[in-house]
Amino acid sequence: MDWPGLREALLADDAGAQLRALDAAGRLTAALPELEAGRGFAQPELHAYDVLGHSLAAVDAVDAVFADGAAGRAFREAIGWVDFDRWLGREVGGEPIAALVRLGALLHDVAKPATATVVEGRLRFPRHGPAGADLMAERLTGLGLGEEAAGLVTKLIRYHLRPQELVRNWPATDRAVRRFVRDLDGEVLALMVVNLADGWATQGPRYTREHFRRHCGFVNYVLARAWAASEDDGPAPLVTGDDLITELGLSGGRLLGAVLTSVRHAQLEGHVRTREEALALARDVLGRPGATD
């Protein structure tokens, strides 16, 4: 199977089911033989599935986020300041971003079997993201993906755990966030969809609405911090994500992006001119009816 055939499956609304059908026919691992090592490869108890099952479940999760069902609507609401459907219509290197994100979800753990090791009696997969990116780089171009499209997929594999690393030292500094954005060539939303899908697939049937709500808040927080830290059109922002966290007691989540966007637009339109005015506006936005619902 060549890339056009795989692309067709990846663009289906039920891409996870389409990939399972290809796998049952022996066509999926014929095109991507690196996936075969994950079949039956057990993971720690936290994981609901073996490595290959987890990877396919991650594609199911992306399907749910992309669709217009309950999960998709909740995700769009959580990042309501982002035009998600317009983003879904983008192409990277001439390829639909929807197909590339699903492919990234399918391959994000491809190097787990090769990197598996036992540390203090516990199974670990050190640096399986970078190892997977290196493993798949030549395969993807050989399959028929162009350099730019293949580059995005390998970044999604390489950095799929980076969001958690970014906030390990809370709160993340703007410098760390800017480095994160640069490493991804700005494709933060694509990575965050894969990150959410990974978390959903890890829990499998145990993944609850509350898990999803909190993960959507985390996605929104990272997107907002990335936007605020990398935004460089016009004058320097009067306030940053760090300022809002420190001065207003925000801990991230769905409000942060809306507040930053409101303040930045007001600055560019000349309605606020000082840091104090910007913080006052941010407090006003937070105090509006429904802001904290």
Image (cartoon, grey):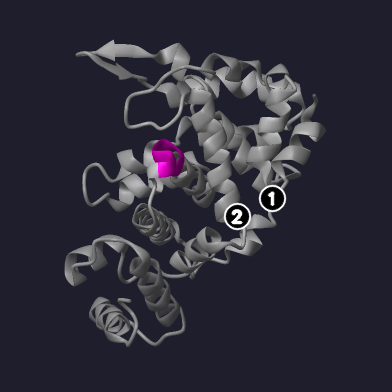
Image point (51%, 22%), residue name: 132
Alpha carbon separation for disc pair 1 and 2: 8 Å
Mark 1 lies on residue: 13
Other-residue count near label 2 (Cα within 10 Å), few / some / many at <14 / 14–19 / ≥20: many
Q: Nearer the viewer, mark 1 or mark 2?
A: 1
Image point (57%, 43%), residue name: 60
x and y percentages locating residue 94 in the rendered image: 76, 44
Relative placement, left or right, of 246 versus 232 is: left
Which image quadrant: the C terminus? Answer: bottom left
Image point (26%, 76%), residue name: 275
The magenta stretch spans residue 203: yes
Residue 108 visible here: no
Q: Which of 203 and 273 lies nearest the eye of the viewer?
A: 203
Mark 1 residue element: loop
Q: Quadrant of residue 279?
A: bottom left
Residue 29 visible here: yes
Q: Is residue 125 above or below residue 22?
A: above
Which residues, given as a range, are shown in magenta? 199-205
* 1 and 2 marks in contact (CB < 8 Å): yes
Type of amino acid under label 2: Phe
x and y percentages locating residue 149 in the rendered image: 67, 37
Mark 2 lies on residue: 66
